[in-house]
Image: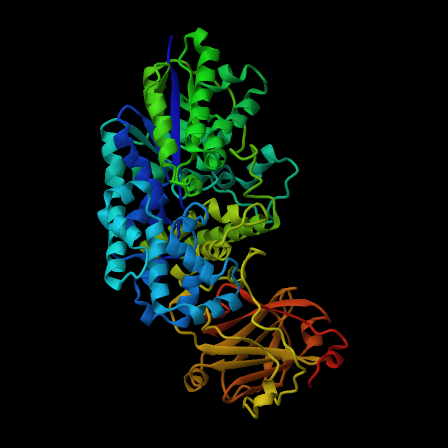
């Protein structure tokens, strides 16, 4: 009887975190996942020489690994880890307290006494008050130990066994020193250097196959044309600005193949379409780019066949499609078995989980063995994230599963290309259903308010890029190439994954900011001003700055001078230095923004770090943007000679009126009647400020977020205990 083939494909994927304009990774996950998922998953195969496994890497992920090890790029988490606690500012300490517990608490933090102690000391819930309180009780040694533990805890099971230094640190548990921490961080960079050569060596000896996804992990059918979503979601509400770019779709495939060949020395054979997303047009493009196989979910197959046949005999084989003489094979993942590894087995004892998976293989074998055909069970899932939830990072489970397959005479592990070359059990597929591995549609990435807003911004930015090229023939090819790269990065799936209500993360703000940053960089590279809308967070979950609500009636003398302490007492207050400088790695020109009101008027006060420098610049303007609800804008020149400010229409930027209640001397003070802004009682108001030089925005307050206040009720004056 022929053996049942097991085709494991572990998909390795991170979005493109690098801001090319600053040279900094906005999040540390490429670096930290390299220490666990990427290293462990390859290294464990040394203990299982008979196992053959498929790995799919997103080229954008491998490119980021390369940029880490070139010595010119890093992330702010790494830089803050490297700093001595005595050199950390309060803002940096707050950042560390907020972010350095981002790892699974039950599977990791609680296992290590000192790490768990630090979490308890900080508190299990976080807000600005808790963080400031923790700031007062955390010693420099506490911060040192937290810096070490955050970076130590991310190392996987293989490295913890191979590196005596890591074992020493784990045993020591606390009272770490700067030299030990620096050695730990250097070890991380050394591990990054090992990743790609290790996978290439496994590939060259034939134990693994490496496939790739389209370069920056886009949902290709939606990049090809947003309207593709209607094929599987006929009632979907699509973006107002349709995005459609077959050229970018092809480019993402072509670039991925070229990248693979340059790093691994052979033409790419297989691709896992991002999130298993396929359509007839996309599969055709894969075939035209000489890709030999792709894979997607079983529900795509069942919908393509429009039949409910014998599941095992239908599912456990690849299918072949032909496009103008080019053949491409399609493997379909067993949805339940794949999801069990990703979501179920971490909650079970490893022996029980491995036994259950092995028994599934045996049941399938016993069901189809009489056919004497080469059936293959395709198990395809995320190859890095699941192990965070296993108590031992998946070590025991993986070892047991691999051993059971190696030692079972009825089972055999294979790579997908080996299967195509050596076995003959493919069926013809006349058409392919449009959809992804999640609900066999694209509802995660399009159709919601936030997702659609993202696609519209993407479409408008791409139109700008095309128009710019037409209007500037002969423009700097290097800058144009970088602008296109930013566009391809913005087409990645992850930005849309986190929009809407389906998923949330501690990094919602960063993902929202990164998407808009990639689009803004296109304008920056072409020396153009980015649209204001790219400064406005798309996500309702994104950070809203609500430092303090006004708590007293204001009647300041609008003369640009601080006349007395009580003039602005009770105003809401925002200080950019409490976070903005960390995000931008620069010192803010605006030091403080105060805001408040009485029944009829809204007041603003702006303090600057260097008023003389700012007021004598001669080219600076301030714009105040009201975005929720969308209301008219305020703009004025930042000069002591300025005697008025303008109210600008939010619809067409027409000047609606000029008001003279402005004072600029030591500070800036403004008085705006609510009726001029169309703000009504009890409106929930969101605003941000921009400092503009010429036609370029040089500072945004807050940085990639906004300030919130509620307009006063009619009886506001009587509600205040002090006037």
Between residue 37 and residue 694, name the one nearer to us.
Answer: 37
Quarter in which the C terminus is drawn: bottom right
Residue for point 43% across, 87% down: 612
Quadrant in which residue 77 is drawn: bottom left
- What x and y, as percent, mark residue 683? 70, 67
Residue 429 appearing in the image: yes
Image side of residue 415 versus residue 601, left or right: left
Residue 603 to residue 320: above or below = below
- What x and y, as percent, mark residue 74? 31, 57
- What x and y, as percent, mark residue 537? 54, 59
Quadrant in which residue 294 is drawn: top left
- What x and y, as percent, mark residue 380? 43, 30
Between residue 480 and residue 609, name the one nearer to us.
Answer: 609
Residue for point 50% across, 63% down: 704
Residue for point 22% across, 28% down: 205
Model colouring: rainbow
Residue 601 to residue 269: above or below = below
* The furthest residue to the bottom: 563
Residue 26 to residue 554: above or below = above
Residue 473 appearing in the image: no
Quarter in which the N terminus is drawn: top left
Image side of residue 202 versus residue 685, left or right: left
Residue for point 76% across, 75% down: 714
Residue 140 to residue 263: above or below = below
């Amino acid at each position: 009887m022929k053996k049942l083939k097991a085709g494991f494909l572990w998909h390795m994927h991170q979005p493109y975190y690098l801001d090319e304009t600053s040279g900094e990774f906005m999040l540390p996950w490429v670096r930290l996942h390299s220490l666990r998922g990427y290293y462990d998953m390859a290294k464990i195969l040394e203990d299982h020489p008979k196992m053959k496994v498929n790995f799919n890497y997103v080229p954008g992920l491998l490119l980021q690994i390369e940029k880490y090890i070139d010595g010119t790029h890093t992330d702010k988490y790494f830089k803050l880890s490297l700093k001595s606690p005595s050199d950390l500012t309060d803002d940096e300490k707050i950042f560390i307290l907020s972010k350095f517990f981002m790892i699974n608490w039950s599977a990791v933090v609680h296992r290590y006494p000192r790490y768990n102690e630090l979490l308890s000391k900080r508190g299990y819930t976080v807000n600005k008050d808790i963080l400031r309180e923790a700031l007062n009780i955390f010693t420099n040694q506490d911060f040192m130990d937290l810096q070490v533990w955050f970076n130590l805890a991310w190392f996987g099971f293989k490295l913890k066994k191979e590196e005596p230094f890591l074992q020493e640190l784990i045993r020591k548990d606390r009272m770490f020193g700067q030299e030990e921490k620096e050695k730990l961080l250097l070890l991380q960079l050394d591990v990054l250097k090992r990743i790609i050569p290790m996978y290439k060596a496994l590939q060259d000896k034939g134990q693994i196959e490496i496939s790739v996804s389209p370069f920056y992990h886009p949902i290709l059918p939606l990049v090809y044309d947003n309207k593709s979503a209607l094929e599987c979601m006929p009632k979907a509400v699509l973006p107002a600005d349709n995005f459609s770019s077959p050229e970018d779709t092809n480019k993402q495939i072509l670039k991925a193949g070229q990248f693979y060949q340059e790093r691994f020395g052979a033409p790419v054979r297989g691709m896992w379409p991002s999130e298993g997303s396929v359509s007839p047009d996309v599969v055709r493009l894969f075939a035209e780019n000489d890709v030999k196989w792709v894979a997607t979910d079983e529900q795509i197959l069942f919908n393509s066949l429009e039949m409910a046949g014998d599941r095992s005999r239908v599912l456990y084989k690849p299918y072949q499609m032909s496009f103008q003489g080019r053949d491409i094979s399609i493997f379909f993942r067993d949805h339940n078995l794949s999801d069990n590894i990703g979501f179920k087995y971490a909650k079970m004892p490893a022996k029980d989980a491995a036994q259950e998976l092995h028994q599934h293989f045996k049941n399938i074998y016993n069901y189809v063995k009489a056919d004497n055909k080469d059936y293959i069970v395709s198990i395809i899932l995320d190859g890095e994230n699941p192990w965070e939830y296993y108590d031992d990072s998946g070590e025991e489970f993986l070892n047991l599963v691999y051993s059971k397959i190696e030692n079972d005479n009825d089972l055999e592990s294979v790579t997908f290309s080996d299967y195509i070359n050596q076995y003959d059990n493919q069926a013809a597929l006349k058409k392919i259903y449009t959809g992804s591995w999640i609900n066999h549609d694209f509802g995660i990435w399009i159709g919601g308010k936030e997702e659609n807003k993202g696609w519209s911004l993407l479409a408008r930015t791409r139109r700008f890029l095309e128009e710019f090229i037409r209007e500037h023939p002969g423009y700097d090819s290097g800058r144009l190439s970088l602008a296109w790269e930013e566009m391809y990065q913005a087409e990645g799936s992850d930005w849309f994954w986190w929009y809407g209500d389906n998923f949330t993360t501690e990094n919602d703000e960063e993902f929202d900011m990164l998407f808009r940053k990639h689009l803004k960089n296109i304008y920056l590279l072409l020396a153009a001003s980015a649209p204001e809308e790219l400064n406005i967070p798309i996500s309702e979950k994104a950070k809203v700055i609500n430092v303090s609500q006004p708590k007293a009636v204001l009647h300041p003398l609008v003369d640009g001078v601080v006349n007395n302490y009580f003039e602005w007492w009770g105003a809401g207050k925002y200080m950019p230095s409490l976070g903005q400088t960390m995000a931008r790695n620069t010192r803010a020109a605006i030091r403080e923004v105060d805001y408040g009101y009485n029944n009829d008027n809204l007041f603003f006060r702006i303090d600057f770090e260097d008023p003389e420098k700012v007021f004598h610049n001669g080219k600076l303007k301030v714009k105040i943007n009201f975005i929720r609800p969308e209301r008219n804008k305020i703009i004025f020149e930042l000069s002591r000679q300025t005697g008025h400010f303008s109210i600008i229409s939010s619809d067409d930027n027409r000047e609606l009126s000029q008001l003279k209640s402005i004072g600029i001397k030591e500070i800036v003070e403004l008085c705006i009647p609510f009726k001029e802004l169309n703000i009504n009682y009890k409106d929930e108001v969101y605003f941000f400020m921009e400092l503009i030089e010429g036609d370029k925005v040089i500072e945004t307050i807050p940085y990639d977020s906004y300030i919130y206040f509620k307009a006063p009720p009619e009886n506001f004056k009587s509600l205040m205990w002090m006037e």
